[in-house]
Image (cartoon, rainbow, N blue to C red):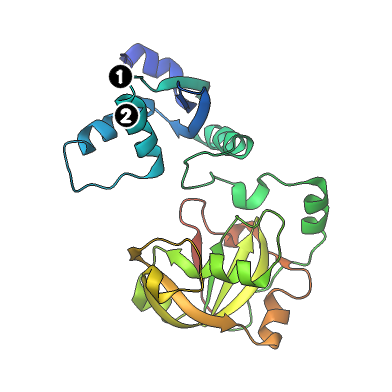
């Protein structure tokens, strides 16, 4: 089984986008961007974890382990190559949008700005007013990107409050948390208490797992005057410079 490229091949590949395919059903279960031998690293990670009984695998690695236990090998497919990094990130994000049931934990670069949208969503988004962050508030913008057209306040609240890689000292200074979906603010909430993300402390959120190394917050809908500033009736667009990076999801905005 091939598990590395020669230097000559790496030089031709440059930045590339790849898919991992389950040979048992032919379905793509992961899309990634890489250079060098990146495409092979996921299987190697499973092989190293298998010797550590205390390790917990994420869904991607568990799928790889199941494939190997069944006597098969992961199929590698290089979807595009010979690109620079920026172009490769765009291709990766487009493929992540195109394939269902992926085990990618992040939706890809630029998804928050110009990711998969219907024509109606495009028209709605770009006709919205732009949000202003000059009102003197300590803010935390969190990209959720899982609404799929829904605007249920309870769904938005549950998605934005659980759970994120944040330092509690910094999070505690936040006055309002703004929920963003593909570059549009769709909710504003007042955090009352930040705690480690332990599911039993959030019994009203269904299906969450314990992630004590991350933070979640107890809170409430922001007062109407704050909602009107940042969300209004239909949401407000965020300047692309203020949208959290794809692989971070969160961005602090300090008073102007």
Residue 109 is drawn in which quadrant? top right
- Toward the front, the furthest residue is 70
Q: Residue at x 78, y 51 (%)?
A: 122
Residue 184 is drawn in which quadrant? bottom right
Residue 84 appears in the picture as rendered? no
Position of the C terminus, as image quadrant, is bottom right
Left or right of 47 in this view: 104: right
Above or below: residue 110 compared with residue 207: above
Q: Residue at x 58, y 71 (%)?
A: 157
Residue 187 appears in the picture as rendered? yes
Q: Secondary structure at mark 1?
A: loop
Left or right of 171 in this view: 123: right
Left or right of 17 in this view: 189: right
Q: Of residues 85 and 90, which is closer to you in this image?
A: 90
Residue 210 is drawn in which quadrant? bottom left
Q: Which residue lies under the disc numbered 1? A: 3
Q: Give coordinates of residue 56: x percent, y percent.
A: 28, 48
Q: Secondary structure at mark 2?
A: helix
**Residue 107 image label:** none
Q: Give coordinates of residue 204: x percent, y percent.
A: 51, 73
| Mark nearer the viewer, 2 or 1 | 2
Q: Residue at x 77, y 46 (%)?
A: 118
Position of the N terminus, as image quadrant, is top left
Q: Which residue lies under the disc numbered 2? A: 43
How many residues crowd around disc 1 within 10 Å: few (fewer than 14), some, or many (20 or more)?
A: few
Kindly indicate whether the residue at mark 1 contacts the one at mark 2 (C-beta within 8 angstroms). yes
Q: Give coordinates of residue 90: x percent, y percent.
A: 58, 37
How many residues crowd around disc 2 within 10 Å: few (fewer than 14), some, or many (20 or more)?
A: some
Q: Residue at x 66, y 72 (%)?
A: 153
Q: Of residues 82 and 26, which is closer to you in this image?
A: 26
């Amino acid at each position: 089984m091939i598990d590395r490229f020669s230097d000559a091949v790496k030089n031709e590949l440059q930045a590339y986008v790849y898919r991992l395919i389950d040979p048992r059903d032919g379905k793509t279960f992961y899309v990634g961007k890489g250079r060098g031998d990146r495409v092979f690293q996921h299987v190697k990670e499973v092989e190293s974890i298998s010797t550590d009984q205390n390790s917990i695998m994420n869904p991607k690695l568990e799928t790889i382990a199941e494939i190997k236990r069944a006597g098969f090998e992961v199929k590698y497919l290089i979807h595009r190559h010979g690109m620079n990094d920026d172009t490769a990130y765009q291709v990766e994000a487009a493929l992540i949008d195109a394939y269902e049931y992926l085990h990618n934990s992040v939706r890809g670069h630029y998804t928050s700005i110009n990711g998969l949208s219907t024509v109606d969503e495009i028209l709605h988004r770009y006709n919205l007013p732009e949000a202003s962050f000059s009102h003197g508030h300590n803010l935390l913008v969190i990209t959720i990107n899982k609404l799929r057209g829904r605007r249920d306040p309870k769904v938005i609240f549950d998605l934005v409050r659980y759970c994120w890689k944040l330092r509690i000292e910094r999070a505690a200074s936040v006055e309002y948390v703004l929920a963003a979906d593909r570059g549009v603010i769709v909710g504003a909430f007042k955090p009352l208490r930040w705690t480690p993300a332990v599911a039993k402390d959030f019994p009203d959120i269904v299906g969450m797992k314990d992630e004590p190394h991350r933070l979640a917050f107890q809170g409430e809908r922001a007062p109407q005057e704050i909602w009107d500033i940042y969300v209004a009736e239909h949401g407000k667009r965020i300047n692309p410079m203020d949208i959290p990076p794809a692989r971070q999801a969160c961005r602090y905005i300090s008073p102007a």
